[in-house]
Image (cartoon, rainbow, N blue to C red):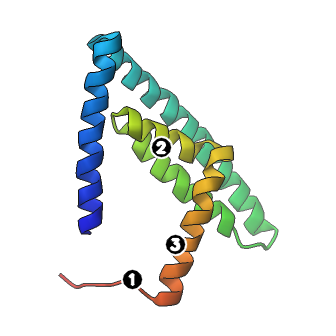
Amino acid sequence: MRWFLLTAFLLSAFEIGVFIWIGDMIGPWWVVLLVLLTGAVGFYLAKQQGIETWQRAQLSMRNGEAPTGYIIDGICILIGAVLLVTPGFISDAIGFLLVIPTTRKLFKRRIEQFIKHIITNRTIIYRKW
């Protein structure tokens, strides 16, 4: 949890720095327009890819196959959509990488390895609050 908070803090600081840097180069209103444009395009792309992945998973289940690869794709698309809706150029770049099918493969392997690691080591901790 500490690493997550530290990463979120550092990413936010870098995002603000990139906003200022790009704002100095192209102007603040262009930065706002660019953030809104990338958010809209990213949302459309994530929606399209999500629907397509859902349809493929359903087809896979109808054929009696486990949709494991499509579930990982769905996780990548969901994370990418959240990053694309979040204002920032760094988060948008990572979000686009997660949503676009050809670049998603790089993250997909890592997520699969992470999930397998959690399952084999049983590192999921449940705490009752």
Looking at the picture, does residue 92 appear above or below residue 69?
A: above
Q: Pick the quarter of the image with the C terminus.
A: bottom left
Amino acid at the residue labelled 2: Ile
Residue of label 1 = 124
What separation in Å lies between label 3 and label 1 (alpha carbons)? 12 Å
**How far across and down, in percent of the image, does residue 109 sit?**
62, 64
Crowding at dot 3, Cα within 10 Å, few <14 / some 14-19 / many 20+, comes out as few
Residue of label 2 = 94
Crowding at dot 1, Cα within 10 Å, few <14 / some 14-19 / many 20+, comes out as few
Report the residue at 26% width, 32% height from top.
17
Q: Residue furthest left?
A: 129
Q: Secondary structure at mark 2?
A: helix
**How far across and down, in percent of the image, does residue 25 sit?**
34, 13
**How far across and down, in percent of the image, does residue 92 sit?**
44, 36
Q: In this orientation, which residue lies closer to the viewer: 76 or 71?
A: 76
Numbered tag placed on residue 65 in the rendering: none
Report the residue at 72% width, 55% height from top.
56
Amino acid at the residue labelled 3: Phe
Crowding at dot 2, Cα within 10 Å, few <14 / some 14-19 / many 20+, comes out as some
What separation in Å lies between label 3 and label 2 (alpha carbons)? 18 Å
